Amino acid sequence: DTAVSQTPKYLVTQMGNDKSIKCEQNLGHDTMYWYKQDSKKFLKIMFSYNNKELIINETVPNRFSPKSPDKAHLNLHINSLELGDSAVYFCASSQGTAGGQDTQYFGPGTRLTVL
Amino acid sequence: QKEVEQDPGPLSVPEGAIVSLNCTYSNSAFQYFMWYRQYSRKGPELLMYTYSSGNKEDGRFTAQVDKSSKYISLFIRDSQPSDSATYLCAMRTGNQFYFGTGTSLTVIP
């Protein structure tokens, strides 16, 4: 039973298009994240939501907009796609935000290719 | 300076060897330390999680944290070809997680 799932797994699109990536977790976690992993494997956090509330918003172009309809879902919408947006996008979730033992569980990733 | 530094490798060892993977960090506020394993075209999966300085063992894996030196290590004993993957260290303070760039490991049969 998949804990953190993402759709689609692969996304190939043209520059200038708008696309969305969906993420769902069935772990009952309160916090969800979006990461971008570039070709050099560097994982960089983009956003984090706790109980549908934005708590981390790193320096990311405002073409990227996260949306959390409920605490089990965190979607990522990208407007006006650019070549540099090509990367693997990972969704993750964790139980809480601070204090205590807490770590993240990752989805399988969405490989985005912008042509 | 990056928050977390990790040698990207690649590291290639024969089967059965002991592997040592390391990360250094600059932020003394980091409280929790993790190691993730990432197979090609897969998401990172949690291997080890530590809080305090010292060693933590789980099967063939040992995680070591030295907060005074701001240095963490992952040791893999009796390495297997199935251990071939990228290993990422990660650190947390509050609700912020920081990842190393990952070390690519290949275990040769």
Image (cartoon, grey):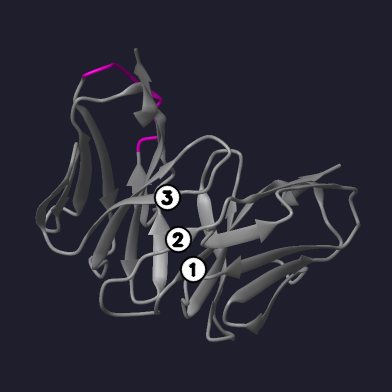
Q: Secondary structure at mark 1?
A: strand
Q: Which residue carries the number 3 mark?
A: B45
Q: Residue B9 colored magenta? A: yes
Is residue A10 left or right of A50 when viewed as pictured?
right
View extreme (front): residue: A1
Q: Which residue carries the number 1 mark?
A: A93
Q: Are marks 2 and 1 in contact (CB under 8 Å)?
A: yes
Q: Secondary structure at mark 2?
A: strand
Query: Alpha-carbon distance for marks 3 and 1?
Result: 12 Å
Quadrant of res A97: bottom left
Q: Which residues are magenta?
A: B7-16
Query: Camera-side residue: A7 or A100?
Result: A7
Q: Amino acid at mark 1?
A: Ser
The chain identifier of the residue carrying mark 3 reads B
View extreme (left): residue: B54
From the image, give the main secondary structure of the stretch colored magenta.
loop
Q: Which residue carries the number 2 mark?
A: A105
Q: Amino acid at mark 2?
A: Tyr
